[in-house]
């Protein structure tokens, strides 16, 4: 396994740019683009390989990769007392637990993007 294999490689169509855009969330959010999906993926893999190689040559630390990462389904969120209160009141108005209300709100926010 190469060190670059631990990094996510995402290629998706951008309606705004009218082309495929390749990105690696841990290292870069864009910069590889083109009209052929497979070519963009190949260029993205090459860019990540070069990024890793350059970082190692310069003794720069690399961030941990997301590829294959397992998630527990839990995370702590600090949001401030006023927002905590508002969320608790809203969840009560809807007859839901605070957790259920917040999960649904987050899912809706992500789906509406």
Image (cartoon, rainbow, N blue to C red):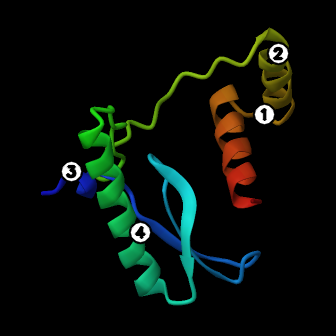
Q: Secondary structure at mark 4?
A: helix
Residue lying furthest top in this view? 81
Residue lying furthest front in this view? 58
Residue 41 x, y percent position in the rendering = 41, 76
Q: Residue at x 47, y 31 (%)?
A: 74
Q: Residue at x 69, y 44 (%)?
A: 106
Q: Considering only vertical position in the picture, is 3 above or below 96?
A: below
Residue 60 x, y percent position in the rendering = 33, 33
Residue 113 vs residue 52, the one in the foreground: 52
Q: Considering only vertical position in the picture, is 61 above or below 45?
A: above
Q: Which mark is residue 95?
A: 1
Give the CA distance from mark 4 to mark 2.
44 Å
Question: Does the CB distance between marks 2 and 1 fall below 8 Å?
Answer: no
Give the CA distance from mark 4 to mark 3.
15 Å
Closer to the chain start, of discs 4 and 3, is 3
Question: Does the CB distance between marks 1 and 3 fall below 8 Å?
Answer: no
Closer to the chain start, of discs 1 and 4, is 4
Closer to the chain start, of discs 2 and 1, is 2
Give the CA distance from mark 1 to mark 4.
47 Å
| Badge 3: residue crowd in 10 Å (few <14, some 14–19, many ≥20) | few
Q: Which mark is residue 3?
A: 3
């Amino acid at each position: 396994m190469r060190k670059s294999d631990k990094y996510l490689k995402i290629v998706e169509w951008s309606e705004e740019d009218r082309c495929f855009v390749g990105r690696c969330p841990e290292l870069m959010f864009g910069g590889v683009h083109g009209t052929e999906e497979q070519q963009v993926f190949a260029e993205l893999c090459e860019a990540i390989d070069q990024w890793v190689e350059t970082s190692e040559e310069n003794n720069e630390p690399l961030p941990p990769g997301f590829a294959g990462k397992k998630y527990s389904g839990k995370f702590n969120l600090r949001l401030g007392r006023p927002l905590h209160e508002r969320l608790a009141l809203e969840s009560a108005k809807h007859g839901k637990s605070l957790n259920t209300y917040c999960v649904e709100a987050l899912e809706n926010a992500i789906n509406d993007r």
